[in-house]
Image (spheres, helix red, strand yellow):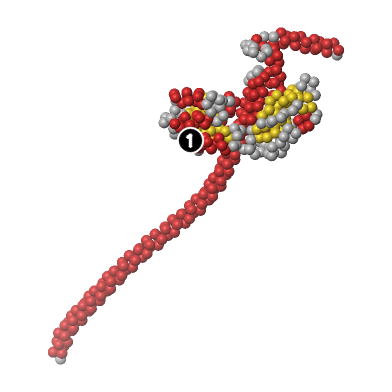
Amino acid sequence: MTDYSCLVVEDSPMMRQLLVFALARVRCIHVTEAEDGVDALRKLASQKFDLILTDINMPVMDGLKLVKRIRADAEHANTPIIIITTEGSTEDRQRAMALGANAYITKPIQAPQVIQKVKELLKLA
Amino acid sequence: MSDDREDRRSDAPADLGREREVLVRQFLRRGFEITESMLSENHTLRDELGRVRDENARLRSHLASDTAIRDLIRRIDALETERRELLLRSDALAESSRQSERRSSEIEAELHDLANLYIASSHLHSTLSLRRVVRHLAELLQQLVGAEGFAIYVSEGDGRSARPVYSENLSDVPAIEVGEGAIGVVMATGIARMADAPHPAGSLEAPVAIVPMLVKDSCVGAIAITSVFDQKEHWAEVDREFLRLLGSHAGTALIAATLYAERFPEGATPDPRIALAPMHDQLARQKESDASADKSGATDR
């Protein structure tokens, strides 16, 4: 069975824990955590991931900038990105999708929803 | 006379010979005819025998074919019965599979809810910093419940009023009197209130959810949620569980952080082990106190 690597970018340790727990329900996924956009770019410089989940509102570098930087990098240009938005407002979501995100999840997150999106993008469904 | 006799003598053998010859010839002809007739009859019978044999073989073959058909029909019936049984079993298995999937989804959801509750509880008690406890509490309300507008109230020392220590998306959050107003009543009774649905948004006078923070049956504060995110369409059972958990854990977490802050004022960042140093003395004192209480109880008896 193929192993997949997933990068979770979220400044809240609690949310990271929730996401890691949800992803642990999907077999063969290895999760790497990053605290913000800069931390994520550092990790992306040394490793290629199969999937990236990122929050939008983060200190240092927010999720939108991160999506833009990832899409500008040929190495990670095609890596699927799921953005996690706090609010249901469509503005941030539309911007992120326009920048190249592949899917979005709104908070409060539900593990089954996260699992479904992840499986869809990794073509595990 | 004698000539007549001689003539007769000479004629008789000649006639007999002819008659015999005729008779023999007739006999032979008849024998030939009979033989020919018998041969013909034999030929006819042989033909007839051949026809009968062919007919017999055909009938045998037909009979065998009928038997095979009957066998096949019996086999088809048996297979049809087997097919129906298999279909029934297949339906039963499909139903069982559907039930398992439903159960699996329910277990997944329950697991997710338990994980949320565990994470909420562990994060609430993961720090002794008062600011962090309040921040975690706010974060839990936002991230797990989907609260958009809310206020966290903590009782004043006399327990007759409560002041907000944190609020989100609320412009003016006044102090409240315990026993007055929706929040005050919840603090006085210690009984949570939740609207049937989180929408439409409420206000501080009529929040969509009010949860008392209880410590040993005493209400030390309250969480009032006035609005939730648009995407949260209804309360889930886990929301009630989660708010109940916050109500029972937030108070103790706030008290522990407050006592810790008093013991180690702002700016000091002691090794947490220092905070536990007096614990052994306190435990010993409590043990002595419990023992003396037991002794006096025994004397009274």
Q: Position of residue B108 (x, y in %)?
A: 59, 34
Image vertical order of residue B298 relative to residue B182, above or below? above
The answer for which chain carries disc 1 is A
Q: Residue furthest bottom?
A: B1
What residue appears at the point 48 percent right and 37 percent down from the top-left corner?
A123
Quarter in which the C terminus of chain B is drawn: top right
What residue appears at the point 46 percent right and 26 percent down from the top-left corner?
A44
Numbered disc 1: secondary structure: loop
The mark total stands at: 1
What residue appears at the point 55 percent right and 36 percent down from the top-left corner?
A93
> Which image quarter: residue B285?
top right
State the residue in front, A101 or B11. Answer: A101
> Which image quarter: residue B259?
top right
State the residue in front, A63 or A14. Answer: A63
State the residue in front, B87 or A114. Answer: A114
> Which image quarter: residue A78?
top left
Q: Residue furthest left?
A: B3
Q: Position of residue B103 (x, y in %)?
A: 60, 37
Q: Amino acid at mark 1?
A: Gly
| One can see residue B117 in this view | no
Q: Position of residue A49 (x, y in %)?
A: 46, 29
From the viewer's perspective, is B107 left or right of B178? Answer: left
Image vertical order of residue B71 relative to residue B149, above or below? below
Residue under circle 1?
A: A100
From the viewer's perspective, is B276 left or right of B46? Answer: right
What residue appears at the point 44 percent right and 59 percent down from the top-left corner?
B66
